[in-house]
Amino acid sequence: DQYVMLDDNFYGITTLYAPPLEDHKVDVVAISGLGGHAFGSFKERDENYMWLRDALPFDLAGEDTYRPMARVMIYGYESAVAQSRSVQNLEDLATSFHNSIRALANAPTTMITLSKSKKEDDRQLVRAVYGIVFFGVPHDGMDTSSLIPMVGDGPNRSLVDSISRINSQILSIQQQEFHTALGSEGDSEIVCFYETVESPTAAQGADGKWSMTGPATTLVTTSSATHCRPWENGREHVCAIARTHSDMVKFGPEDHEYDKVRERLRGLAGRAWGGRRRIQNSSAKFLVPYRYNPDFVGRSEILKNLQQQLGCGRPQGAITSRPRVALHGLGGVGKTQIALAYVYWLQETCPEVSVFWVHASSAERFRQSYASIAQECQVPSYDDPKMDMLLLVKKWLERQDCGRWLMVIDNADDIQVFFGQPAEPTDNGTSSPDGNLGRYLPESTYSTILITTRNKQTGLKLTQGKGPIEIGKMDEDESSQLLRTALNGVSTTTAELSTLSSRLEHLPLALVQATAFMQENTISASDYLQILNKSDQNLVDLLSGEFETVGRDSGTPRAVAETWILSFEQIQQQDAFTGEILSLMSLFDRQAIPPKFLSYNKQQHAGEPMSEIQLTKALGILKAFSFITEDKDRNLDMHRLVQLVTRKWLVNRGTMQRFTGQALLAVSQAYPYGNYENRTVCGVYLPHAYAVLESEDTESKDERAARASLLHCVAGFFSYQGRWKEAEMLQVQVMEMRKKVLGDEHPDTMGSMSNLALTYQSQGRWKEAETLQVQVMEMRKKVLGDEHPDTMMSMNNLALTYQSQGRWKEAETLQVQVMEMWKKVLGDKHPDMMMSMNNLASTYQSQGRWKEAETLQVQVMEMWKKVLGDEHPDTMMSMNNLASTYQSQGRWKEAETLQVQVMEMWKKVLGDEHPDTMGSMNNLALTYWSQGRWKEAETLQVQVMEMRKKVLGDEHPDTMMSMNNLALTYQSQGRWKEAETLQVQVMEMRKKVLGDKHPDMIRSMNNLALTYWSQGRWKEAETLQVQVMEMRKKVLGDEHPDMIRSMNNLALTYQSQGRWKEAETLQVQVMEMRKKVLGDEHPDTMMSMSNLASTYQSQGRWKEAETLQVQVMEMRKKVLGDEHPDMIRSMNNLAYTWKSQGRFKDALTLLQNCLHLRQQILGPDHPDTISTRTTL
């Protein structure tokens, strides 16, 4: 006999018996339980007999040699329960054991154990373990209540807790994973022995020492000890031992309980060696042309899915296997790498399964792969030239004695290769290599086929209609891990890896290609990103470079770009129309491409209708190749990198210019002119308009016209949004293009000039607008004649520009001419005729000629109602204009009544969020404001502001106007801080959007100055007002109404500071200028006279003040009427002057009249009414 010298502790692996090398077939490793001794645990109690050493080696003899074939070992570790100083937990112990037995993995191993360890990624070790024998191992946990006092708060408390039946996380995880840890039935065996005699528990004696003298109990229940798998529920695998828990493995020389163990260990050892021998002697083939890829990362869920669907290495009945599975995804997404990772997993897990790798990028490559299988497997008659070699291989693989196998059909992209017309037989009776190869795929009950394809249609056919596993791009973690692994040794940051992954769309092949470039050229990730960011061309060039990587067929391109171009060529050859659709799509923006754009192609251009079925099929092919996807709205998205590579393909083929022109024509045809009704479509189509407009100009006349038309429509959209600078840039391009292509005097050219002038007008650039409008008017007179509608429209636009500059006489003269001409040419009831009347009324209104304005506006309103109906937008606009005139006259009730009607009608006809509806709400709010009904005004203004933000955007001029109006309402309520905050926001936004010199921007400064003034912050108000005055003088001119208003405001600030002489000087100037520009009886002129009287009043110059106030009151009575608020204000001011002169009776009478009128007109709660009542 051969024995081994032992030390006291037996830590680690200790060999008890080792057979001669030629007889060594099996390893047996015994592991003691918690608190046990590696050697002593297996000794007969109080004797020297140790069955692992003295009996087992000789009981495990070879069937043919009858000599011992097992090396028997024990494994020791420190696991004392009481007075332990170890802080190791169960995982630490398992890791130590795992490291010790890795070297034993080459031989079948049986472990006799009270614990279990398995590291999932060490598949070789798992394969080496055939059997595990458990003696009273508490798989569900054990009763540790008697052990806890022994442990106390010692460092090993967590170790004891981990085997408790109560809430052990480790045991819970083990139960979940145990049944699949060692493979399926036939791959391994588990035998469980359980105790049938109660054991004493731990008790502490009087001396403080612990001993097993406590009450007896079953320490490990039968259910906890028997943790075998479903197919291991018989007596061969579950067996009772009539011993206590601690004596279960203490056998003597003549021990009938040992006989039970010996019988089962003999069977395990024999089956372990027999299984290994069958594997070693099997004819399994592994015909895979690529080495294992150590850099493969991620895709764990997909691999798990493959394992489930293909069924190899899984327990019978655990899954429903499928004979054919396809991996489908974009070229370069990693399908082949996933297949490669799977077959290497399969080789380790199920080495008896053969693996055959078939290249399918072409019929010839398919044939070559089958020839390799035939030769390697020595398929009978494979080298007979008269035989159909493909058919021979198919039939040979379908034979039951061929065993289990997996075939990988890689790069099965070309549907024609597999399902095209069958090839004609050759002279020797065999088929040519480009025939219908799908018929040569073998069918077998015991075997499976894994297909990789870029073409979903091919995948579906090859799997007989079963949906493929879709392979998408990697997630952020996976792509970063791939880069980190491939760039081993290269310094990178997490941010760089994330950015690079994103720039390359998380596409595995592109990422690997990038790392290869960095390593070959010794550059950092940061350097690589800089190259990428310089231009899209750099990105395409980098994606086109050849590089070496695992798993790429020599017959297919290695570069990402070339991979896709090969697919493009296949598509073009099989269906030219689909190739054209792909080409066209690549020149739009890559996201949300409307199918409507695709209807414009060369067939339609040639006058041939395009079939909807034809387009549906073409898009189906592109979706099948993963080049495009479809969203829920049926719009199409194109992968960014695919788009860039497609453009490169067009350049290579010399077709870029043709498809660029088609794309431009398609978008130009579909893009509507920008207005409210078309705003959604315009916004959706805008990225595509940008995309086609970025292309270089072409020589085609049609394409130039299309470009001009598209620019014109997009400019209209920008104008609708108040983006006038952008609109202007596009309109200048349109004008120049039309001048060049059509000539200066073409109607379309003049139309573009007119549009540009209107954009200047919207920006307050009235001189530029005027210059251009005069040109257009003169040219239209010359080309079209004085009475052509376009000529009269030019005159109308010019009049509006005069009006905006306060040049009302010039505006009026022109508008009267236009109105008379419209009447003559088009008749009284033509819409353009009524529009001209409306414009003239607006000019009257601006001059304070409200009666004339009202008369004209009533005519227009009645005519619109008669011609267009009550609910036509033009009718409602005329009602709105009339209400504005009522408002100007202080006839607020009439204005309010009309405005409420208009608002409700707008809501009904156009909807709550139409700009005209919001405009009517804004007007009604101003009427509330004028009546001092500030809460109602505020409520409505907040609604309008929020709606405009939603519909028009935060920076639209109308939205900013709403914010401005709300600020004025805050100001009127004395909420100065809120007003100031909002006004500063508006001022900054207008400065950003409209520019420093826009009239609205200057108006914001003026309003903010008034808020400062209202708070008594006169220096700040003055500073801002001086700036406003100087800017208006420069931008608008000395005599513009807004310029004169600035002077008036500054004078009031001087007055508030007691600087009456400066105020007086400025007010005299304002009054004289308004008399000159506006006339003596204009409301603003009369306001100037009133302000000057107030300054006289402040200086105690009562007579001068009285003279002026009497004049103003008489003029207002004549022009505005007895009940106009300004007329009543004059009475109030004069009464104050009389009071200051001691003329109390006259003052009282006038104030009483004033109060009566204000209560009647404004209401008892209006601020002015309250002020008068208080004065009385």
Image (cartoon, grey):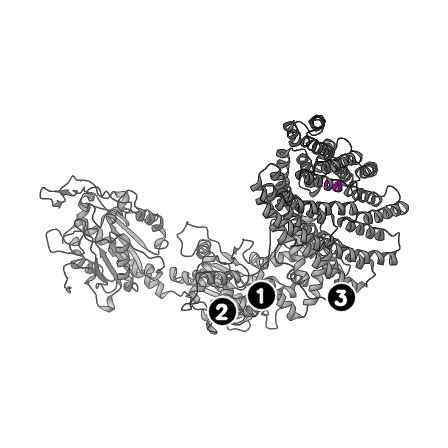
Q: Is mark 1 on a helix, strand or loop?
A: helix
Residue 373 lies, with reference to residue 944, above or below; the image says below
Of residues 1053 and 365, the one nearer the viewer is: 1053
Q: In the image, what residue occupies the spot 71% across and 66% down? A: 697
Q: Name the residue under label 1.
A: 564
Q: In the image, what residue occupies the spot 69% across and 30% down? A: 1162
Q: Which sits earlier in the primary sequence, circle 1 or circle 2?
A: 2
- Nearer the observer: mark 1 or 3; the answer is 3
Q: How far apart are marks 1 and 3 (CA)?
A: 31 Å
Q: Label 1 is placed on what type of residue?
A: Trp
**Stretch of the chain drawn in magenta:** 1080-1087
Q: Is mark 2 on a helix, strand or loop?
A: helix
Q: Can residue 592 be seen in this view?
A: yes
Q: Which sits earlier in the primary sequence, circle 2 or circle 3?
A: 2
Residue 734 lies, with reference to residue 140, above or below; the image says below
Q: Mark 2 points at which residue?
A: 527
The secondary structure that dominates the magenta segment is helix
Contact between marks 2 and 3 (CB within 8 A): the answer is no
- In the rendered image, residue 809 lying in the magenta stretch gets the answer no
Task: Give percent across and percent down for residue 404.
Answer: 43, 60
Using a 10 Å C-alpha cutoff, classify the residue at mark 1 as few (fewer than 14 neighbours), some (14 to 19) or many (20 or more).
Answer: many
| Left or right of residue 1153: residue 41 | left
Give the quarter of the image for residue 775.
bottom right
